[in-house]
Every structure is written in C-alpha cells, then in structure tokens.
Image (cartoon, rainbow, N blue to C red):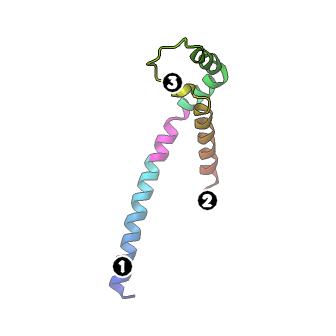
Amino acid sequence: MTRIERITKMEALFDKSEEVIKRLEAALEDFAKIENDIAVLEAYYDKDWRKDFEADEAGKLPKDLKRGVLSEDGIYDLLSDYQCLKDQIRTIE
C-alpha cells in the first residue's frame, strides 16, 4: 500500500468514525432527555394503565383516539428496551 493509499484509507475511516460518533452523541443526549418521560410512563404503567386498557377493551374510549400506549406489549416492551439500553450503555468500556 502506498502512502497516498494509506492516507486515503485512514481519511475514510476517520470521516466514518467522526460521523458515527456525532450521531451517537446526539442520540445519547436525546436518550438522557427522556429519563423523566420514562419515569412518568413507568408510574402510569404501574398505576393506571390496566384501568385504561380495560376501558379500551370495553369500548369506552373514542374510536379515533391514538392508543399505542394501551397495546398489551407496547409500553412493557418500550420500558424494557429502555432499561436494556441503559444497562448496555453502562457496560461499554
């Protein structure tokens, strides 16, 4: 490999790495900002979610109401994914 080829290859690796690091940095900032939102969702899931789910099942909610939070697995999976990502971030060396 010539010097020019080596520098060209290293420049490409540099550019790619820089972009990934910038995207991850932004994503981590966004992730940190939702900590309070997740706490609110956890409290909702522990306290009121079941009542709202049952009301939906009984047809007591408007048909046009967005209700992804009431899907049986949706909120549980979201909270679980959040915790897994927090654990994964802690273990990165």
Q: Which secondary structure lies at badge 1?
A: helix
- Span highlighted in magenta in the image: 27-35
Task: Report x, y in % for residue 35.
Answer: 55, 35
Is most of the magenta stretch helix, strand or loop? Answer: helix
Identify the residue at horizontal 55%, vertical 13% (top origin). 59
* Residue at disc 3, secondary structure: loop
State the residue lying farthest toward the right.
46
Q: Left or right: where does residue 24 sit relative to residue 92?
A: left
> Residue 47: x and y, percent?
66, 19
Residue that numbered label 3 is attached to? 67
How many numbered marks are there? 3
User: What's the distance in space between the residues labelled 1 and 3, CA to CA?
Assistant: 53 Å
Q: Dividing the image into 4 quarters, which one contains the C terminus?
A: bottom right
Q: Residue at x 38, y 81 (%)?
A: 6
Task: Kindly indicate the quadrant of the structure image that contains residue 45.
Answer: top right
Q: CA distance from mark 1 to mark 2?
A: 28 Å
Residue type pointed to by label 3: Arg
Query: What residue is shown at x 36% (from left), y 79% (from top)?
Result: 7
Q: Which residue is mark 2?
A: 93
Is the Cβ of the residue at disc 1 closer than 8 Å to that at disc 2? no
Question: Which residue is drawn at the image coordinates 40% and 64% (left, top)?
Answer: 16
Residue 8 or 56: which is nearer the viewer?
A: 56
Mark 1–mark 3 CB contact (< 8 Å): no
Amino acid carrying label 2: it is Glu
On screen, 14 above or below 24?
below
| Rendering coords of residue 13 (x, y %) | 41, 70
Residue that carries the numbered disc 1 in the rendered image: 7
Disc number lying in front (2 or 3):
3
